[in-house]
Amino acid sequence: MIKIVGIKLLKTMLILIGIEVFVFVLMIIFLMSDEPTNPIGRFLYLSLKYVLGFPLVLINEEYPFFLSSKNMPGQMIPLVLFNNLIQAVLIFGVRNMFKK
């Protein structure tokens, strides 16, 4: 039972990481234009920060702080993985709550 839950949790985490990478790449593509503020790029930035950054964005408004800085800090990867683990547990819990 625990092994199945762990596999499902890992699968959910990998899907969330894939979505984050996809949105991050799209954001870079849309923001690399000559326009002052691209609305699609701004929407992708806000969704990456507030939707995909939930729940750590509630604790630290600067999360994910690597979006606004020019260089990526060393603690970015553990924070993103920790945030995705929290999101996967929340999704898994809500999904199990509605199944019962």
Image (spheres, rainbow, N blue to C red):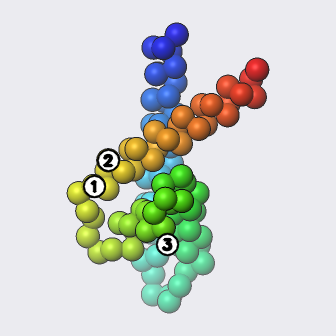
Amino acid under disc 1 = Gln
How far, Cα to Cα, is label 2 from label 1? 6 Å
Q: Which mark is residue 37?
A: none
Q: Quadrant of residue 43?
A: bottom right
Identity of the residue drawn at 39% across and 50% down:
80
- Dot 1 crowding, Cα within 10 Å, few <14, some 14–19, many 20+: few
Q: Quadrant of residue 34?
A: bottom left
Label 3 SS: helix
Q: Mark 2 = which residue?
A: 78
- Toward the left, the furthest residue is 74
From this view, report whether residue 82 is shown above or below residue 67. above
Q: Mark 1 = which residue?
A: 75
Look at the image and tell me whether residue 23 can be seen: no
How far, Cα to Cα, is label 3 from label 1? 26 Å
From this view, report whether residue 52 is shown above or below residue 44. above
Mark sitting earlier along the chain (2/3)? 3
Label 1 SS: loop
Label 2 SS: helix
Task: Mark 2 and mark 3 in contact? Answer it, CB < 8 Å.
Answer: no
Q: Mark 3 = which residue?
A: 30
How far, Cα to Cα, is label 2 from label 3? 26 Å
Amino acid under disc 3 = Phe
Mark sitting earlier along the chain (3/1)? 3
Amino acid under disc 2 = Pro
